Amino acid sequence: MNKFDFSSLSSHLKAWPFEEASKLANHMKLKKNKSDKPALLETGYGPSGLPHIGTFGEVARTSWVRQAYQALTGMPTKMLAFSDDMDGLRKIPENVPNQKMLAEHLGKPLSKIPDPFETHESFGAHNNARLCAFLDRFGFDYEFASSTQYYLEGRFDETLIKILYFHEEIVSVIAPTLRDERKKTYSPILPIHPLTGVVMQVPMEKIDVTAGTVVWRDDEGKSFETPVTGGHAKLQWKADWAMRWVALGVDYEMSGKDLIDSVRLSNKICKILGGTPPTNLTYELFLDEQGQKISKSKGNGLSVDEWLSYAPPESLSQFMFNTPKRAKKLYFDIIPKATDEYLKHISDWQEIANSTQNHSEINSQIEILNNPAWFIHKGELPKLAGSPVSFTMLLNLASVANAERSEVLWGFLKKYDTDGSFEKKPLLANLVNFAFHYYKNFVKPNKSFRHANEKEKSALMDLVSQLEIVKNKTLSGDDLQNLVFSIGKKHEFEPLRSWFGCLYEVLLGQKDGPRFGIFISLYGIKETIQLIQDKLKSDNNFAL
């Protein structure tokens, strides 16, 4: 990062993490009770479920804001992955074992419920371990925090006493958002039942700020006086979020669109407690193929492991980087596009790095810093990154060859690779395997060819004739693209993309496809001639 003069570049850095970093920098300047503490960026995790693709997205995006902030300011930061493992288990997840055992512990803090997987001391500990392993897998730099540990160690005690002092003001913030029946009993305080261990959601009969206690009754009418400190009680969600911001001094936290109201209310409570709310980014939610909200319980989403079965992790990062404030469909069809976007960005970065010594030109520096690959690779250009062939092109090769093995794709690539440079591209080797699996599971079952009409048949025959003329010549992909383009113009396809639509739908059995000239150069001119001839012969017994 020290290669760049950020003071002179900052006004030109339009990538969204830099915009967020600027907001965070302003927040740090205006923050009351300034100290030398690093800017604290927090991500939240609810350990009643296993880490999922949304968890990855939030941590990755927060990491990119952190990277941009450090680059712009040179100031230290810390990222806290906070697990609310003191939350009471309200319903039993469907994807865990020992359901009957869990039913016996409903309402208890996750950190006090036996692990249904029987590998850790509690259900919360099991899922926390899964979270850390999940984040470590992607190399995130973070500090893990357990709600239970922080409550028990007294890290929240001072702020919890403030909650008691401002109890009625906090209730007045939340109450208007509740149903009439709930308004009568609401309190931000959730005492832990000393006998059953259940997180109690009951009205408070007495608030004693001096003693730091609350008086309440359980379902049997028995009265208890419980300290709010030392882990004897926890807070309702919105108050808990605000309390955490104040107690820990959180400076930045992003959250989903579904939490807009929670952010608004927690900001109010934070200010009541004398704190400064953190800078926030509201990101849009993921949608399935039908445009419905992704739901873990419905299983209509796409998991991290499913994604990584068909594409490299950088492609998932690319998908998460794109327009976080815009709703995006999250299903298998978007994997090739995200992969090729990443390949384009890493190629652009490499091209600039190779052509501009030490990134001395201002425009080159700006292009690099606004490039998603700069964030995905933490500011360091990998020596062997990138691929000379797009993921979509590999899928098209697999499609026309009806590939049953990934070696079929290598056959085309080695014929095209005259200088042996492909062997120096490790990502390409992975992409070949990914493309084969993706083709087998998603492309092949959905191939749908159509017949060419008379105009298209004439143009295809003309293309064969022109390819016959040049079949023994060495032409670049661009030369062949110009040849294909000229055939479309000659036969007066309007719009011209309808000619390329013909090539994709008639020859490849799909709606979209690659730059056809590049495809010909990879697949081979003679092989392309044969492909067209075979298709036309089978098309209503059309005779050449």
Image (cartoon, grey):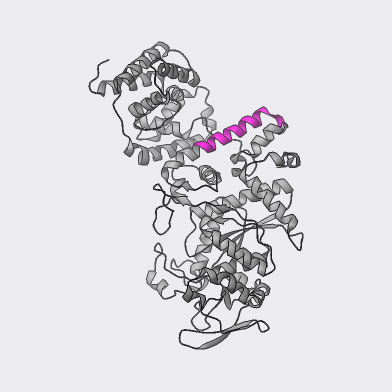
Q: Is residue 454 left or right of residue 54?
A: left
The magenta stretch spans residue 349: yes
Q: Would residue 153 be seen by someone viewing this image from the given angle?
A: yes
Which residue is rendered at x = 53% and y = 88% of the image? Answer: 223
Q: Nearer the viewer, residue 297 or 164?
A: 164
Which residue is rendered at x = 72% and y = 52% of the image? Answer: 26
Vertical arrangement, residue 72 with respect to residue 533, above or below: below
- Per the rendered image, the range of residues in magenta is 340-357
The magenta stretch spans residue 181: no
Q: Is residue 477 left or right of residue 240?
A: left
Q: Position of residue 365 (x, y in %)?
A: 69, 35
Q: Pick the quarter of the image with the N terminus.
A: top right
Q: Position of residue 426 (x, y in %)?
A: 52, 36
Which residue is rendered at x = 57% and y = 67% of the image? Answer: 238
Q: Nearer the viewer, residue 421 or 269?
A: 269
Q: Is residue 285 left or right of residue 507?
A: right
Vertical arrangement, residue 255 with respect to residue 386, above or below: below
Q: Would residue 408 be seen by someone viewing this image from the given angle?
A: no
Q: Nearer the viewer, residue 540 or 261?
A: 261
Q: Position of residue 37 (x, y in %)?
A: 73, 60
Q: Position of residue 536 (x, y in %)?
A: 29, 21
**Direction top: furthest residue:** 469
* Magenta span: chief secondary structure: helix
